[in-house]
Image (tube, rainbow, N blue to C red):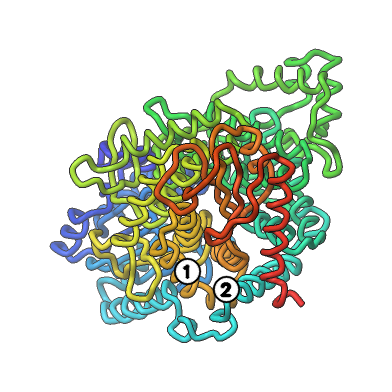
Amino acid sequence: MNRLGAETSPYLRQHAQNPVDWYPWGDEAFDLARAENRPVFLSIGYSACHWCHVMAHESFEDEQTAKEINERFVAIKVDREERPDVDAVYMEAVQAMTGGGGWPMTVFLTPDGRPFFGGTYFPPREGHGMPSFRRVLDAVDDVWRNRRDEVDQQADALADAIERRTRVPRDLMGTDDETRADPATRAATLLASAVAELTERFDPSWGGFGPAPKFPQAQLVELCLRHHRVTGDESSLAMARTTLRAMASGGIYDHLGGGFARYSTDTSWTVPHFEKMLYDQAGLVRTYLHAWQATGEPDWLQVVEETIDYVLTELASPGGGLCSAQDADSEGEEGRFYVWTPAEITAALGPELSAVATAWYGVTDTGNFEGRNILRRPLGGTLARPPDVEEARRLLLAARTPRVHPGLDDKVLTEWNAMFASALAEAAATTGRQDWAGAAVRIGEFLIGGLRSPETGRWLRSWQEGRARHRAYAGDYAWLVDLFTRLAELTGRALWLDHARDTATAMLELFAGDGQLLYTTGSDAEALVIRPMEILDGAVPAANGVAANALLRLGALCADEELTSQGESLLDALAAVAAHHPVACANAVAACALAGGGITEVVITGERPDLLAAARARFEPTMVLAWGEPTSSPLWEGRDDATAYVCRRYVCQTPATSPHELARRLDDELATGRAAMAPARR
């Protein structure tokens, strides 16, 4: 047994019985590499990664391969979800070397942590233009022993490349006159540019933005919805609706148990990589919720309800919070838990209902996945199930439940929990679902109680079975600020704003850099080859864009000009990059739109649930809502009881005392925001 058995990461513990003498990331491994003058073999993956499991079975469980690793290298295993800083640094190195990246990630380092060779999955035998893993080990060992000068030159060059790739180029830092224009013009320009690029990439038949493999990319659909809200452009709404319907109809969506798989391997969203990630559910819940608010189409609310039910049922951690992911594999096969033969459906339903189910879900004798069927709906069909189909769904789910379930990654990550709880709080407010509201509050309370250091109050990244570890990153802090602000809007309790402001202040102190943007790691973190910085969105939105959104919304609710100014400073630093890569900076573009069109501040005093419901029912991405316990914000000064106020920069329209009047005031604010951004659209 190696050194991974006591780790909080299920992914690391999966490798605890490997014959490879794994170390977790830390000083012990690098001290040994320096003492014995050996290179470091770094392997990075995550528990729901199918090809990570494949390489583990083929190579890391093989005694001879392990012997070669142990004799020549110091082996380190990293869970990319626990250590996104380490993953980010070495992913940049692999991309610089190979032009691509992915997991499992395989990187060879000098004892001081500089990478000099890397790739992703390597097979046990050569084929398809790929060297075998053991051949790679031989080649790296040879160059380390016999051509050390080349190793050092390559390591220095890669360290420079990583530095360049993880920083905003100086020629883009605040020098672009167009993006440094007034906020409204900048916002309109960026939003229009992003949607224009999405239009070029859009698949009009199956939705999505680009060829297979297709990822849900909720933030891109969200840009389309926001563009429609600001401009009234029907084509951007059509792109959003086509994409949302295609995803929810396809096999990427679990039609029996709810929730979305990580991505589709094909154009039609039929065959997914079957792992389910908490962060995908968070982004998609929010986007489908906004689509329902924008269109009133009940299919979108059904997807929201089923996805939330899946997360709160299947990913709930017994100790509190939400687990990170479900694996793609069960019983050694990818997707086995989810697929069906006609005979299995008949056995579960009987002849009459099986005929109904096979017609509804497109089941055939030949199947659509290795001779079996991934359930899906035709693209043009409704998602709302008639009573007989709903009964068939219920029975099929019951028949599926005794199967061997995919593995569960039961670590609780601060960032992903905050992402989901934020979306859940918004869904609870919009729908009035008190059970969802209670769940969102419980997650927030769990994070406060379980993922902060009791000695210092510093937020931590990962919790598992009562243990919290690893200093939290900028993304953790940014999403916590967003969550606490959303909980304040959900509950009307001032304490959540206090938590949001405290966390925002700590975020700015720990992560602020000398170039306006936030670093990924805190000033108290261990030193890596470089200090990484999240600028472009990846599998999760980049921390700087999330932070800008969160600071602007919180600043508006609290009338805190310092927080608002910090959010605007982030946008000033991000805007030039977003101008060149608007789709890769979707959250930064959204934040610019939030600042450019102006934030609509709504205050509802007294007990007026009818006014609350009227405000919450609308898709108003630039709105913040104050109600319940008054605070020291100017939003509360001199207000009449049982009244709604619609304001901009704390200057308010005529008070509204009925839902109809409130709707008119909000319509007026929408028109004002559209007018502010109009010049750049003409």
Residue 370 in the image: state x and y as whole percent: 71, 39
* Foreground pick, 582 / 627: 627
Q: Which residue is mark 1?
A: 568
Residue 47, can we see it?
no
Please give the name of the residue rendered at 59% of the width and 63% of the height, measured from the top-left corner: 598
With respect to residue 86, does 316 lie above or below?
Answer: above
Q: Which residue is mark 2?
A: 183
| Residue type beneath disc 2 | Pro
Please identify the quarter of the rendering in which residue 221 is found. bottom right
> Would residue 368 be found to the left or right of residue 74 on screen?
right
Label 1, secondary structure: give it: helix
Residue 198, can we see it?
yes
With respect to residue 307, does 77 lie above or below?
Answer: below
| Residue type beneath disc 1 | Glu
Please give the name of the residue rendered at 62% of the width and 65% of the height, measured from the top-left corner: 597
| Quadrant showing the C terminus | bottom right
Residue 376 in the image: state x and y as whole percent: 76, 37
Label 2 to label 1: alpha-carbon separation:
9 Å
> Would residue 98 be found to the left or right of residue 151 on screen?
right
First reached walking from the N terminus: tag 2 or tag 1: 2
Please identify the quarter of the rendering in which residue 559 is found. bottom left
> Would residue 665 be found to the left or right of residue 155 on screen?
right
Asked whether the beta carbons under mark 2 and mark 1 sit within 8 Å of each other, the answer is yes
* Foreground pick, 459 / 22: 459
Residue 493 in the image: state x and y as whole percent: 44, 37
